[in-house]
Image (spheres, coloured by chain):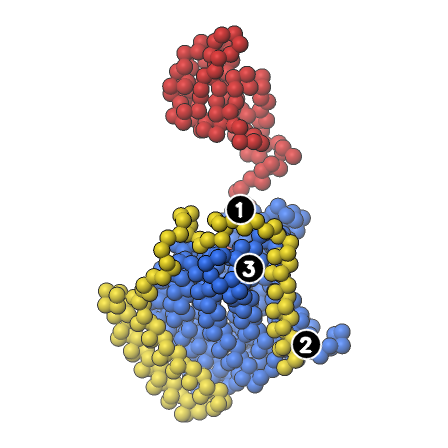
Chain colours: A yellow, B red, C blue
Amino acid sequence: MTALLLFLALLFAALAALVYVGYRLAPKKPSEVKERRFEAGNPPYGEVKRRLVAQYVGYIYLVTAAEAVAGLLIVYALLSGGASPGLFAALALSLAVVAAFVAAYLRVLGDIKRWS
Amino acid sequence: MIVHVKLFAVALKNLFEKPWTVRWPEERRDYGPAPRGFIVNDKSKCISCQLCEAVCPAKAIKFHLEEDGKRYPGIDWGRCILCGYCVDACPTGSLRHTAHLEITWDSLDTYKKPKEMTPGSVAAEVGDKSLV
Amino acid sequence: MIVGLPSDVLAALIFPGIAGILGFLVVAIWAERKLVARVQWRYGPLYVSKPLGGFLQPIADLIKLVFSELVLPRHTNRLLFALTPLLLFVAEAVPVVFIAVAPGLVIFHHSYGLALAVVTWLLIPVFLVGMAWAEADKFTYIGAVREILLTAAYEVPLLLSVLAMFILYGTADPYAVVERQSLWGILLNPLAFLAFYISLAMSTTRFPFEIPEAEPEVVLGPYTEYGSTLFILSFGANYVKMYAGVLLGAVLFLGGWSPFGDLLLGALAVVAKTALLTVPLLLLRAIYPRYRIDQALRLGWSKLLALAVAAVALSAALKAAGVA
């Protein structure tokens, strides 16, 4: 535990010291152009808000579910020591369900006209 | 699938080949004895016909009044693209290319006046000897 | 025990700790530029320290960036603007604490250490999105959205390939995983290694998956507004993620510190294996073009998922047949 805290604290302190040393050593000549938003050469206009483009949100729904399944499988595998009939049955069932679902709906997920 | 292995194989083969780039100025490429380099004007042959100014595609040549009452061309090297149209257009052959290719300047004033463009004002470094 | 320190403090300070991270940053940045240049038939950085092959070029870049003006823009929360790259860098170094590189040389030993390493690995995009949000810029916003989508593509294959190895070894303890590799993991289950490696390339935004930081499309993506030392922190954090990932790969798939048994030689063996895993990741920049985000998503969910599921099936078959 002490090594972990030492590592994190020392890393954070070293990086903060780097930023602080940079701040002290560097010239400070603030100007309006430097401190405004970067807009690839144009003066910035409008707010930074954009409509969230939700064309691929189907993948995000899918990963939320599939990642939970994979996480639970990892927990089951580690708790059962890697080999038990229950584990193999759970693996086969859940991965088959996920694979079938993805195979059936992969084309729908990529069809952005349905999601936009 | 096999195409990925082929891609990696090509990359590994390239990794061990000699680079093509030239580490200028320690190494230089040899462009031969007559490349199209810095343009000089022989004032004794120039007749001030202004054909070079008319044909220049980058509008780099402008004429100046010199001390002997005649006008001679000067070249703006921020604009010149070394295309050689002016040299081809010159009827007397007073405008010529030299072999001087390392055309540099150390300020934003890139204009070479007629007296800086005489044939003896540049020395060309032909060949691939190092410049350092 | 060298120098009389306990071995986990030694791990925290030298390898895989702070000196390892900083050393990897310097060497990996130089190696990437040099390798990519040589593949493209040019020389790479050769101006700074010519006898060393330009090795000190990243140090020269560091010194130049330290002396650059630190610009904190007006339109955003300046404290968060300066703080989020630090948090990102530290967050990307957290998976390293659970990985053991020699008998005794681990910063925080936990019997489910490698599973914790994977979990903290998957939490890194949260910090990246927080950093991109704090920059309050249109390009960083697009880069953050692309990063989220790319995470949605590689997360499940990564988890499944790690699951395949956990089934084979039966444990996630950082020492036991190496001791149970009588045959290296890559030879036992090459499908899992391939799925893991491609997921690693997607995760650290290597070409062909350099989608969040695509320079012609979003000007450096989530790192756009940073300059000076904050740029070192945010952009260098990408390399720290690669460091954590290849350490995990070396321990899971390449046998860790075997065939040596003691601290120093084992650590050197892990260094060699890390370098072996890093070089193809760096060479990817010179080989592949860039995918579009929908192509990367489709790849992650069709071929990569199939590969990972096949890897899990292979592991289950091997375990049921009594191998390893």
Rounded to the nearest angstrom, the CA distance separating label 1 from label 3 is 30 Å
Question: Disc number at residue C230?
Answer: 3
Label 3, secondary structure: give it: helix
Q: Looking at the image, which is closer to me, B88 or C90?
A: C90
Chain of the residue that carries numbered disc 2 in the rendered image: C
Classify mark 1: residues with Cα within 10 Å, few (<14), some (14-19) or many (20+): some
- Residue C176 seen: no
Q: Amino acid at mark 3?
A: Leu
First of labels 3, 2 by sequence position:
2
Where does residue C291 sit, x and y in percent of width and height?
38, 59
Where does residue C242 sit, x and y in percent of width and height?
52, 66
First of labels 1, 2 by sequence position:
2
Residue C179 versus residue C28 in the image, above or below: below
Occupied quadrant, residue A15: bottom right
Rounded to the nearest angstrom, the CA distance separating label 1 from label 2 is 43 Å
Tag 1 and tag 2 share a subunit: yes
Q: Amino acid at mark 2?
A: Val
- Residue at x-position 45% and y-position 58%: C75
Q: Is residue C44 left or right of residue B95?
A: right
Residue C324 versus residue A30 in the image, above or below: below
Residue topped by disc 2: C9
Residue topped by disc 1: C42
- Residue B124 seen: yes
Q: Looking at the image, which is closer to me, A8 or A39?
A: A39
- Residue at x-position 66% and y-position 80%: A2
Q: Amino acid at mark 1?
A: Arg
Where does residue B96 sit, x and y in percent of width and height?
49, 18
Chain of the residue that carries numbered disc 3 in the rendered image: C
Q: Quadrant of the N terminus of chain C?
A: bottom right
First of labels 1, 3 by sequence position:
1
Label 1, secondary structure: give it: loop
Classify mark 2: residues with Cα within 10 Å, few (<14), some (14-19) or many (20+): many
